[in-house]
Image (spheres, rainbow, N blue to C red):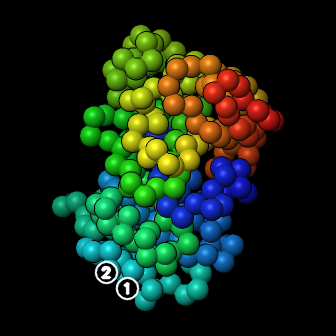
């Protein structure tokens, strides 16, 4: 369902950025890959919480060859595995491999889908990236930008937005003002916003999470309508839905430079 809605059927290497549900979306895409009879590698180019990583079979490795050897040893014809290169001194977070290593793993073609969490968000619903992020593998076939609709209507501050000063700089919204649909749309398309770091050849997709209430769905549809009207890099596809307790899709749209087609 999610793979089809997001247009990822033919994408082997998928990177995820943003906030408000990246990890849950990554895991849901892994489950769909496995349910379809495929092998999935779950990893990160930054860090992932150890308790989240431990939700799946996992291992540490240093080189692409080691990642592939360990994956072959653990996985049967179908299944998912989490892999990392190290951990923080307190053991609470797993550190991912360099993006070049992930590119090598993808080139080997053994995993049917590689899912990469390419930045962090401190569990807040909204964010824009700092200068050093996201860390997106160059071979990514798709970049999924994630935003939590529960952040809309909330004030632009550190309790609701990761890096609120940067958000203000990129979107023009003043600190403390409520974050609206237009502000989120501007954060999506800005060259230094959520689309930052997307390889030119990669599909760019927006997933608006938590569209499980009429007011949030209405806000999501407004974001989607605004995207083609703003200067910047418009995603080719936008999806509104939810991930918990089970994934669901509320609206999808294919976007052009001028309008959103097929919003439902």
Q: Pick the quarter of the image with the C terminus.
A: top right
Kindly identify the residue that appears in the image at 36 percent across and 17 percent down: 169
Where residue 254 appears, as percent x and y from the top left, is 71, 38
CB within 8 Å, label 1 to label 2: yes
Q: Measured from the top left, where is residue 172 in percent x and y?
A: 43, 12
| Cα distance in 3D space between marks 1 and 2 | 5 Å
Q: Residue at x 43, y 89 (%)?
A: 73
Which residue corresponds to mark 2?
66
Between 50 and 9, the one lying in front of the other is 9
- At horizontal 50% and vertical 84% (from top left) the residue drawn is 75
Looking at the picture, how far across and down is residue 117, in whole percent? Answer: 43, 54
Q: Is residue 226 visible?
A: yes
**Callout 1: few (<14), some (14-19), or many (20+) C-alpha neighbours within 10 Å?**
few
Q: Is residue 69 left or right of residue 42?
A: left
Q: Secondary structure at mark 1?
A: helix
Residue 153 in view (yes/no): no
Q: Which residue is mark 1?
A: 69
64, above or below 232, in the image:
below
């Amino acid at each position: 369902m999610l793979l089809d809605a997001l247009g990822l059927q033919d994408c082997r290497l998928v990177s995820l950025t943003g906030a408000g549900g990246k990890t849950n979306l990554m895991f849901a895409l892994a489950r769909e890959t496995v349910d379809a009879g495929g092998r999935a590698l779950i990893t990160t180019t930054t860090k992932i919480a150890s308790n989240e990583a431990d939700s799946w079979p996992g291992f540490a490795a240093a080189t692409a060859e080691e990642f592939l050897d360990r994956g072959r040893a653990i996985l049967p014809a179908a299944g998912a595995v989490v892999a990392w290169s190290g951990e923080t001194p307190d053991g609470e977070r797993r550190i991912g491999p360099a993006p070049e290593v992930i590119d090598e793993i993808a080139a080997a073609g053994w995993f049917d889908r590689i899912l990469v969490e390419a930045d962090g968000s401190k569990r807040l619903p909204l964010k824009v990236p700092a200068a050093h992020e996201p860390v997106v593998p160059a071979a990514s076939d798709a970049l999924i930008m994630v935003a939590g609709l529960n952040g809309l209507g909330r004030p632009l501050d550190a309790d609701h937005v990761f890096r609120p000063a940067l958000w203000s700089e990129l979107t023009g919204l003043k600190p403390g003002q409520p974050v609206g649909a237009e502000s989120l749309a501007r954060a999506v398309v800005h060259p230094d916003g959520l689309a930052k770091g997307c390889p030119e050849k990669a599909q760019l997709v927006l997933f608006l999470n938590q569209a499980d209430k009429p007011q949030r769905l209405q806000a999501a549809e407004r974001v989607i309508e605004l995207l083609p009207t703003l200067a910047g890099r418009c995603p080719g596809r936008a999806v509104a839905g939810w991930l918990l307790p089970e994934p669901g899709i509320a609206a999808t749209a294919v976007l052009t430079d001028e309008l959103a087609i097929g919003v439902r």
